Image (cartoon, rainbow, N blue to C red):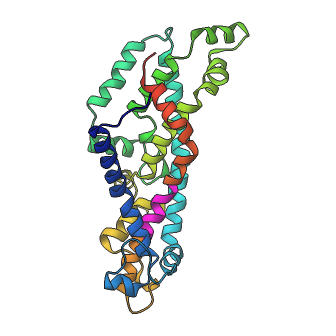
């Protein structure tokens, strides 16, 4: 039966189109500015399409050693941090999803408690300092290893795995670790991809952690360098040549923002097929 569209449907379509344009337009504008000649940028003639196409702004961006170094730091933090987060979250969530787990309710209560109340910035800083993590890469990884929200999404997913599979695995001689690694984990690809994306995006955009815990600029992630360039005009002016340095510096800001944003956006299409399925399976109690 053909569904007849109502005024509410048309409103939703119009609203979604406006919402999409509002989110996509800034990227199009920044791309157009960063690929345009500084003459047209100064004249304010660039809106949707590049004018006087040039790639010299991106050449300036990638010629700055600080950006390349921070890029590498960010990739290391994302890979190491996401791996640690997935391992610790999945192991903890699986343990608390089993009915035979002792103190299951008490441990769940303490985790829920952290979602409502937390120590705050200063106590967290003192803990990180006390553990000797200041000014190390581990300060960008370990304090964010487990998110309570992601933990419960994954635990709910593990709750839906039939206990008969666990019993069959133990009949075949598997230990608890064997059941987790050989049965639960292969069935958890959708939720692992979803939670992994959550962790990766958070670590990629983690600006406050670097601001609080890192003093050595060689350890700074991309977001710190981006902040210096955008808010403090921290780009190396000696690398900028030509007369229209103001326009070129503005173009370089936009190019840097795109360079720091596009890689994490490119990850999403590869795990999109797991994303909706993983979020729904992990959020609906069976």
The residue at the point 46 percent across, 61 percent down is 260
Percent from the top left, x then y, of residue 142? Answer: 46, 41
Q: Residue placed farthest to the right in the image?
A: 172
The image position of residue 12, as x and y in percent, is 31, 42
Between 135 and 253, the one lying in front of the other is: 253
Q: Nearer the viewer, residue 189 or 169?
A: 189
Is residue 261 a member of the stretch shown in magenta?
Answer: yes
| Total numbered labels | 0
Q: Residue at x 38, y 13 (%)?
A: 105
In this view, 243 is above or below 17: below
Up the image or down, 196 lies above or below 161; here it is: below
| Location of the N terminus (image quadrant) | top left
| One can see residue 122 in this view | yes
Does residue 242 sit above or below 51 in this rendering? below
Which residues fall within the magenta stretch?
255-264
Does residue 113 sit above or below 265 in this rendering? above
Quick check: can you spot residue 220? no
Residue at coordinates 55% horizontally, 53% vertically from top-left? 76
Q: Is residue 165 left or right of residue 93?
A: right
- Out of 152 and 29, give the one closest to the viewer: 29
Residue 189 placement (x, y as % from top left): 59, 31
Residue with the most extreme bottom position: 243
**Secondary structure that dominates the magenta span:** helix
Where does residue 144 sit, x and y in percent of width and height?
A: 42, 40
Residue at 46 percent across and 10 percent down: it is: 102
Q: Is residue 41 left or right of residue 60?
A: left
Magenta stretch holds residue 27: no
Residue 23 versus residue 57: which sits nearer the camera? 23
Q: Is residue 134 left or right of residue 180?
A: left
């Amino acid at each position: 039966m053909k569904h007849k569209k109502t005024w509410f449907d048309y409103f939703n379509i119009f609203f979604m189109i406006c919402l999409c344009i509002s989110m996509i337009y800034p990227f199009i504008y920044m791309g157009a500015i960063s690929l345009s000649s500084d003459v047209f940028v100064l004249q304010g003639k660039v809106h949707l399409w590049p004018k006087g196409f040039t790639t010299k702004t991106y050449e300036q961006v990638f010629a700055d050693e600080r950006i390349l170094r921070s890029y590498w730091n960010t990739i290391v933090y994302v890979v190491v941090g996401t791996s640690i987060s997935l391992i610790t979250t999945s192991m903890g969530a699986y343990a608390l999803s089993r009915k035979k787990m002792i103190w299951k309710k008490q441990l769940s209560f303490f985790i829920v408690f952290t979602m409502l109340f937390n120590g705050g910035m200063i106590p967290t800083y003192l803990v990180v300092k006390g553990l000797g993590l200041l000014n190390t890469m581990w300060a960008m990884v370990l304090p964010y290893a487990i998110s309570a929200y992601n933990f419960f999404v994954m635990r709910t997913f593990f709750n839906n795995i039939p206990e008969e599979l666990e019993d069959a695995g133990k009949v075949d001689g598997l230990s608890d670790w064997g059941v987790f690694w050989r049965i639960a984990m292969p069935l958890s690809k959708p939720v692992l991809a979803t939670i992994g994306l959550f962790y990766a995006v958070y670590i990629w955009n983690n600006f406050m952690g670097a601001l609080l815990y890192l003093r050595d600029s060689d350890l700074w992630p991309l977001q710190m360098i981006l902040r210096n360039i955008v808010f403090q005009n921290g780009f190396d002016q000696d690398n900028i040549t030509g007369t229209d340095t103001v326009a070129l510096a503005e173009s370089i800001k936009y190019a840097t923002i795109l360079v720091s944003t596009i890689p994490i956006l490119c990850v999403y299409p590869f795990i999109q097929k797991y994303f909706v399925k993983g979020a729904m399976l992990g959020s609906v109690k069976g």
